[in-house]
Image (cartoon, grey):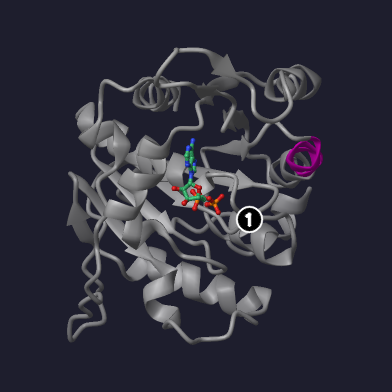
């Protein structure tokens, strides 16, 4: 199996971490980082010791969404302190790339950087570590999921067909490393008019449901398209914490409960 070829398969990379859950998507812009952030914060709110690793080298957005804009501190013995905000510990590959660094990293370099970041960060004891993967299913992603000992994976998609095609590739990728798929999150599923309350399925309808049936994995939730989701992301105040009573926040909390 591919796991036997993986040199890190037996590596106890994260001794104090009980569960590692990857959040993946076929392409960018579907809300993968938004989902990862809100799941992590929701887990923290429910009393679990939670970490969030931003491994999205193509567009690290977790620091912004988590309201962190400092640089990480590296101690003299090369340990890296995670950022703690909104009750969870956070780390981002983006800090170590720099704003102008070209994203031409090959698999082995990413693997080394992720490994180092995982091992050298003082995560302490965690019940769950959520990893925001880069979008896509190429070599970099495959290398990442082979490097980190995963408990399971969540796939994020929008209802459109193109995104759905990529979900299939994502499912295949996790199969290769024997990481169970926890389920699919359909994002931007519908828009509820704030004036009349009418719900409109802006993109295609029922795509997440169809795909979950096809893959035989649960549809964990359907997140509405809502400007408050975007605003809270930009403000670094995760929705589940800042607007816990919105229907999107309720969905995120329900999804977190399944992790
Ligand atoms: P990805 O990680 O897949 O690239 P992001 O989580 O960065 O996607 O989301 C892309 C943009 O869409 C962000 O500006 C985010 O705030 C916004 N967004 C994500 N989900 C929603 C939603 N349900 N409603 C409104 N805006 C959203």
Which residue occupies 40% across, 26% down? 248
x and y, in percent, of residue 205 in the image: 72, 20
Q: Where is residue 189? Give x, y as percent.
A: 59, 26
Task: State which quarter of the image contains the C terminus.
Answer: top left
User: Residues in magenta?
Assistant: 161-168
Q: Is residue 186 above or below residue 98?
A: above
Callout 1: CB less than 8 Å from ligand 1: yes
- 228 or 128: nearer the eye? 228
The chief SS type of the magenta part is helix
| Residue at horizontal 18 percent and vertical 52 percent from the top | 85
Q: Position of residue 83 (x, y in %)?
A: 22, 61
Q: Residue at x 24, y 57 (%)?
A: 67
Task: Specify whether 245 is left or right of 38.
Answer: left
Q: In the image, what residue occupies the spot 40% across and 79% down?
A: 96
Taking the image as drawn, is residue 118 in sight? yes
- Mark 1: few, some, or many residues within 10 Å (few <14, many ≥20)? many
Asked whether 192 falls inside the magenta stretch, the response is no
The quadrant in which residue 238 appears is top left
* 190 sits to left or right of 166: left
Between 39 and 22, the residue placed more toward the observer is 39
* Looking at the image, residue 113 lies above or below residue 16: below
Count of numbered badges drawn on the protein: 1
Does the rendering let one see residue 14? Answer: no
Residue 154 in the figure: left or right of residue 34: right
Q: Which residue, as the protein is rendered here, is positioned at the far top?
A: 197
Q: Quadrant of residue 168?
A: top right
Q: Quadrant of residue 209?
A: top right
Q: Is residue 164 magenta?
A: yes
The residue carrying mark 1 is: 135
């Amino acid at each position: 199996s591919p796991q036997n070829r993986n040199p890190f398969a037996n590596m106890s990379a994260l001794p104090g971490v009980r569960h590692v859950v990857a959040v993946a998507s076929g392409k960018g812009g579907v809300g993968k980082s938004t989902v990862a952030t809100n799941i992590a914060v929701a887990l923290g709110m429910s009393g679990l010791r939670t970490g969030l690793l931003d491994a999205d080298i193509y567009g690290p957005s977790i620091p912004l969404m988590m309201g962190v804009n400092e640089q990480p501190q590296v101690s003299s013995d090369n340990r890296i302190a995670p950022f703690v905000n909104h009750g969870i510990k956070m780390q981002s590959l983006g800090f170590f790339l720099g704003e102008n660094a070209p994203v031409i990293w090959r698999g082995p370099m990413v693997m080394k950087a992720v490994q180092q970041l995982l091992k050298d960060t003082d995560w302490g004891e965690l019940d769950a570590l959520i990893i925001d993967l880069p979008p896509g299913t190429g070599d970099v992603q495959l290398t990442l999921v082979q490097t980190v000992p995963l408990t399971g994976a969540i796939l994020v998609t929008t209802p459109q067909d193109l995104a759905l095609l990529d979900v299939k590739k994502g499912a295949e990728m996790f199969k290769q490393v024997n990481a169970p798929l926890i389920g699919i999150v359909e994002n931007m599923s519908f828009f509820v008019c704030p004036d009349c309350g009418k719900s409109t399925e802006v993109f295609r309808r029922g795509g997440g449901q169809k795909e979950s049936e096809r893959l035989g994995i649960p549809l964990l939730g359907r997140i509405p398209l809502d400007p408050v989701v975007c605003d809270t992301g930009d403000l670094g105040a995760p929705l589940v914490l800042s607007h816990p009573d919105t229907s999107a926040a309720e969905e995120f909390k329900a999804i977190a409960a399944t992790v």
